[in-house]
Image (cartoon, helix red, strand yellow):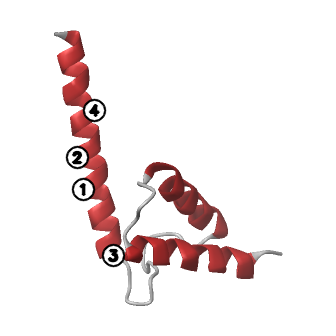
């Protein structure tokens, strides 16, 4: 029974992550970045890129891949 509960927990986590991803992607502007309440700092951008690269499938959607590329470009420009 414990193994079944763990399986359900993993399914819930995957569903939550999928929902969060959809919501975040819906907030992207046509230019491929977020505006408003989300941070535009280099640290938050680097954190998002690292998380996406680590946890998304190797074959990402073009929109996500484009967002990651723009984030990397931002980090390159923001270097001191």
Find the residue positioned furthest to the front.
Answer: 59
Mark 2 nearby-residue class (10 Å; few <14, some 14–19, many ≥20): few
Q: Which residue is mark 3?
A: 27
Q: Are marks 4 and 3 in contact (CB under 8 Å)?
A: no
Q: Residue at x 22, y 46 (%)?
A: 15
Mark 4 nearby-residue class (10 Å; few <14, some 14–19, many ≥20): few
Q: Earlier in the sequence, mark 4 or mark 1?
A: 4
Q: Earlier in the sequence, mark 2 or mark 4?
A: 4
Relative placement, left or right, of 76 versus 47 is right
Relative placement, left or right, of 56 versus 24 is right
Label 3 sits on a secondary structure element that is loop
| Rendered location of residue 19, percent (x, y) | 24, 56
Q: Which residue is mark 2?
A: 15
- Location of residue 75 (image quadrant): bottom right
Q: Earlier in the sequence, mark 3 or mark 2?
A: 2
Q: Which mark is residue 10?
A: 4
| Rendered location of residue 7, percent (x, y) | 23, 25
In front: mark 4 or mark 3? 4
Residue 22 sits above or below residue 32 on the image: above
Label 1 sits on a secondary structure element that is helix
**Rounded to the nearest whole Å, what is the CA distance between mark 3 and mark 1?**
13 Å
């Amino acid at each position: 029974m414990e193994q079944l509960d763990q399986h359900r927990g993993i399914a819930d986590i995957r569903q939550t992550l999928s929902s969060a991803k959809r919501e975040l992607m819906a907030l992207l502007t046509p230019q491929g970045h977020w505006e408003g309440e989300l941070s535009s700092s280099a640290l938050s951008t680097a954190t998002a890129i690292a998380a996406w690269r680590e946890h998304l499938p190797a074959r990402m959607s073009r929109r996500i891949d484009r967002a990651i590329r723009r984030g990397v470009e931002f980090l390159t420009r923001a270097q001191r």
